[in-house]
């Protein structure tokens, strides 16, 4: 399974995916970064179309900030994000993440993402409801850190090629080691685009044999 070759074939077939979609024009601004992190939580077990509805409702209610979420009553917040499903659990996750951000980084994601990668990843994983896929989505798409996001589509793609591992970390190491020659901003860009392309492939139920 030659990942760089597969990436190039996917890119030619599907074209750039333009992930992560945010409403703010300033994709490096605090508002956009926070929207990405909220989206990473809301997209757990949810279709993106339903997540977009929830994000739109949060935006309309002026609740797309750590301070606003922290100050909003759980039942009120839950109703706003209800379209994303599992709203009680996701309300709790959003409030925990927002409180963490306010307490440790004064609400600044830019400050948070300046932390050493492994230390920050550990902090995120220690939060209730933040698993590896969610933490790595925040780190890659909002923090522009070189971590490869592993999801169900990624595992399905690997299985198509007879590549199977036991843990999330094993899959991640497989991707990161094969793509280790790519450095700097190019690596972040490649990880971003490759993961998005794999999701596109998975949703389209494409026949991976055509890319061998």
Image (cartoon, rainbow, N blue to C red):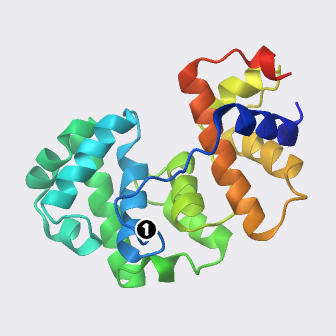
- Above or below: residue 102 compared with residue 178: below
Label 1 environment density (alpha carbons within 10 Å; few <14, some 14–19, many ≥20): many
Count of residue discs: 1
| Mark 1 residue element | helix
Q: Quadrant of the N terminus?
A: top right
| Residue 107 located left or right of residue 188 | left
- 143 or 21: which is nearer to us? 21
| Residue 152 located left or right of residue 43 | right
Is residue 159 at all visible to an observer of this figure?
A: yes
Residue drawn at x 65%, y 40% is 15
Is residue 86 at all visible to an observer of this figure?
A: no
Q: Where residue 197 sits: x, y (%)?
A: 64, 38
Instruction: Look at mark 1 in the image and give the residue it sits on.
Output: 33
Residue drawn at x 63%, y 47% is 149
| Residue 89 located left or right of residue 104 | left
The image quadrant of residue 65 is bottom left
Q: Where residue 97 sits: x, y (%)?
A: 36, 63
- 28 or 117: which is nearer to us? 28
Q: Where residue 54 sits: x, y (%)?
A: 24, 46
- Above or below: residue 37 compared with residue 99: above
Residue drawn at x 69%, y 44% is 194
Q: Where residue 100 sits: x, y (%)?
A: 37, 71
Q: Quadrant of the C terminus?
A: top right
Residue drawn at x 79%, y 44% is 175
The image quadrant of residue 38 is bottom left
- 57 or 161: which is nearer to us? 57
């Amino acid at each position: 399974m030659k990942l760089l070759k597969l990436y190039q074939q996917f890119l030619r077939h599907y074209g750039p995916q333009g992930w992560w979609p945010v409403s703010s024009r300033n994709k490096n601004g605090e508002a956009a970064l926070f929207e990405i992190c909220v989206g990473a939580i809301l997209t757990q077990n949810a279709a993106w179309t339903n997540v977009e509805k929830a994000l739109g409702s949060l935006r309309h209610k002026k609740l797309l900030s750590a301070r606003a979420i922290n100050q909003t009553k759980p039942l009120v917040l839950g109703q706003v994000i209800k379209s994303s499903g599992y709203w009680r659990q996701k309300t709790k996750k959003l409030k925990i993440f927002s409180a963490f951000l306010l307490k440790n980084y004064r609400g600044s994601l830019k400050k948070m993402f300046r932390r050493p990668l492994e230390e920050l990843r550990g902090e995120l994983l220690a939060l209730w409801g933040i698993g590896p896929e969610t933490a790595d989505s925040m780190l890659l798409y909002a923090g522009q850190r070189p971590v490869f996001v592993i999801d169900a589509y990624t595992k399905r793609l690997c299985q198509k090629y007879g590549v199977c591992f036991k843990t999330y970390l094993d899959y991640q190491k497989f991707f990161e080691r094969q793509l280790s020659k790519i450095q700097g901003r190019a690596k972040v860009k490649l990880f971003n685009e490759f993961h998005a392309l794999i999701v596109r492939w998975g949703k389209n139920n494409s026949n991976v044999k055509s890319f061998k």
